[in-house]
Amino acid sequence: MGEDTDTRTKADGGTAPRDVTFEQVDWDEIDADGVARSRKRVAWLAVVSLWTIGVAYDLYSRFVAETGQAAFPVLGSVSPVDWLWSFTLLVLLYYGVVPLYENPRMTRYYWKEFKKNKAAVVSALYLIVVFAIGVIGPRVLPEPEPTPGLENQPPVWGSIEAYSAGTSCAGGTTTVDGVTMCQGSWQHPFGTTSSGEDILLSSIYGMEVSMQVGLIATLMSISVAAAVGLTAAYYGGLVDEVLMRYVDIQMTFPTFFLFLLLAYTIGSSLFVLILIFGLFGWGSSARIMRSEALQRREEPYMKAAKNAGASSLWTIRRHLLPNISNSLITAATLTIPSIILAEAAIAFLGLGDPTVPSWGRLISDGRDQLRTAWWISTIPGGFLFFTILAFNFLGDALRDALDPRHGGSGE
Amino acid sequence: MKWYVIRRVLWAAFASFIILTITFVLMDQVPNQQLMQAEFQAAVNDVDVETAVQAEKERLGLDRPFHERYLDFMTNVFQGDWGWSYEYDQPVVDVVRETVPYSLLYGVPAIVLSTVIGTAIGLYSAVNQYTKKDYAATFAAFFGISIPNFWFGIVLLVVFGSWLGWVPIGWNADIPLAADGSWTLLETAGSDHPAFFRQDFEGERYVGILSPANLKQLILPTFVLMTGAIASVMRYARAEALEYVDADFVKTAKSKGVSNRAIVTKHIFRPASIPLMTILVGRILGLVLFGSYLIEVVFGIPGIGLASFQAIIRQDTDLVAITILLPTFVAIVGNLIEDIMYAVLDPRIDYGDR
């Protein structure tokens, strides 16, 4: 973490050459730096308040005026999941991408460390591609729709006996050994499902669902975990006892079974699923962060901050949080795959929202067709498997790089 | 020590109490099946619906205040009176008694095997750290953790069941049973046994838990359940063992000329096994409980997971409540046992601190 404080001084006053004395420092320039920083903050606050106003208006027209979903000028109506999704993307941009852009030297250092782990680099690339396609694809591509007549079409390289497929064949037919075979075509590169939905399109929509569930729920659970873990560690005593006993109770109720219970009693939707995994799945992350923060609490800089008169909130935010960020990032990357897997499993069981084009739903769609049309289950399953694998590789690499105790490739 | 155990037990009781309360409050919101049935009956028979529903409510005790029903629910749960399952048309207790053995049939071997194999690979990997074998094991563990259980099960079923024909595709629930429907380890039965329905053959075939046909149909579910569990155990075992690989007492043993085997089993495995126990109970149990739900649906095993799943689909409220509560209790008891074992086995643990 020594490098981190180093860049902070550089960003603040790094423009002044090394050999100037204190009197010669151009304070106007540094003030201007401060203004620039606050400009970024102002922009951030403006975006957040715009988002809050939008949510408030949506809630107002739904529950107070009861006129249904609010319609916005350019966006039309926005679903609850989309509200959370847009906020998650904003937070990722502001706390993830912007700091990296502002500190190119640190970015280069991280990249140098990171690229030592080939598997993690490949994983990151794969995830970026899936993420980008998942975010952009559903905005520009048509929704996958059941097409009668085009059922069980094979992928572009394959073929299927014509009697197993729908009445028409997109890629034309050939006759092999007296059997009419239906050829795949570029119109449906990965073929179609048993209801005639294009698998490529469905998979792209599924990418968005997986990313939404994984990222939104993880952001929620990590925020709660950090708040609880750090508060418990910072105050100690009774606060610690109460919070951690609550965590104990919460962890005895497995999130999956809690979801089943809630799905049964109040109905399931993607929104409920995200909320449950986001709000009740943070127990173990909170424990990890608390134990890390307990060590950091004894460091001299915490005493220095306290003696300088910093408030509790300030100390937690500016001194404790940045110094446990390694645990936080690792916990986040390892939470994402478990949530994506749980969502797919629930969709596979058919206990989720049936209108959501999830990978799990596609896999269960193709279950009965496995002998004739193996690709319906296999292709979305492959996407799911590689996404989870990539997140696990990434999380492990980050832990090696960021956690000094694991003694991996990071120094 | 005594106080520690007592505190732990009290804590587990308190956690169970909270979970029961949450379940009761949530289940109270679900429309009652019997009431709906009464309403339907009244409408069909052209009786006044209001009075019929009211009468049914009184009969079921649903018109009583919330706290009385709550007390009732609590006492019933502890007395083993878990309600009635409409789908199976028998008490929930009997449904649980019939389905749980099927879950244990593949769950127990999966837990035992994955613990043994996972620990062995983890120790081996730790002793040979940064060799090709270690990398291969770590890489395999990643696959085991990442592969979605239900998807893997389907793929294996297609490859080994449908293409190669090595294992049966449908699950025959009668094979582990004797002809009269009781559980048996191994015996022979003729073609009148329910497992051989519509099969004509001369002589007798083996039935029972250890019969070849039963073992054959258990291979895939056990294996699929094991993949995730082995990988988790292996990763933890490796991490724990690595703490002791370079310890002073291991170096001393080495310099004294102790054999490699003895070092691994006596000097590395022993201290590492205590923290390993924690994850065994907590993590593996969680993995198995969650995994069994999906595996039973994929393979069609009539265990508790499949019963719970069908209860949810068919709105069988009492059965849903119990089948969700049971795994949760198993988890609580597992955690309790783990904490107590930890205290008994590790003399370094401080009982005064919580």
Image (cartoon, rainbow, N blue to C red):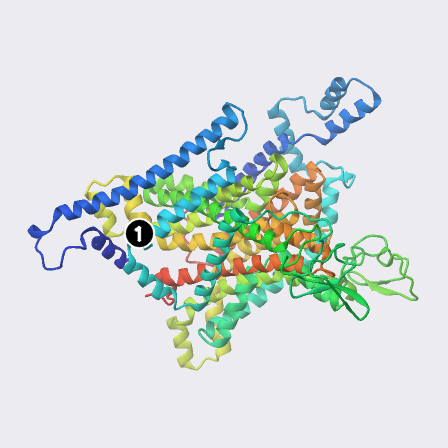
Q: Is residue B342 visible?
A: yes
Above or below residue A385? Residue A283 is above
Near-viewer residue (B350 or B241): B241
Above or below residue A59? Residue A110 is below
Which quadrant holds residue A265?
top right
Q: Is residue B336 visible?
A: no
Near-viewer residue (B173 or B81): B173
**Residue at 74%, 69% in the rendered image:** B164
Local packing at callout 1 (Cα closer than 10 Å; few below 14, some 14-19, many 20+) is some
Q: Position of residue A66 (x, y in %)?
A: 53, 24
Q: Position of residue A321 (x, y in %)?
A: 33, 48
The kind of residue tagged 1 is: Arg
Secondary structure beneath label 1: helix
Left or right of residue A309, residue B4 in this image: right
- Pointer 1: what residue? A296
- The answer for which chain carries disc 1 is A
Name the residue at the bottom extreme.
Answer: B257
Q: Position of residue A198 (x, y in %)?
A: 64, 53
Above or below residue B24? Residue B67 is above
Q: Position of residue A245 (x, y in %)?
A: 45, 42
**Residue at 59%, 57% in the rendered image:** B148
Above or below residue A301? Residue B17 is above
Near-viewer residue (B274 or A114): A114
Q: How many marks?
A: 1
Left or right of residue A342, residue A178 in this image: right
Left or right of residue A297, residue B233 in this image: right
Q: Quadrant of the C terminus of chain A?
A: bottom left
Q: Quadrant of the N terminus of chain A?
A: bottom left
Name the residue at the front extreme.
Answer: A172
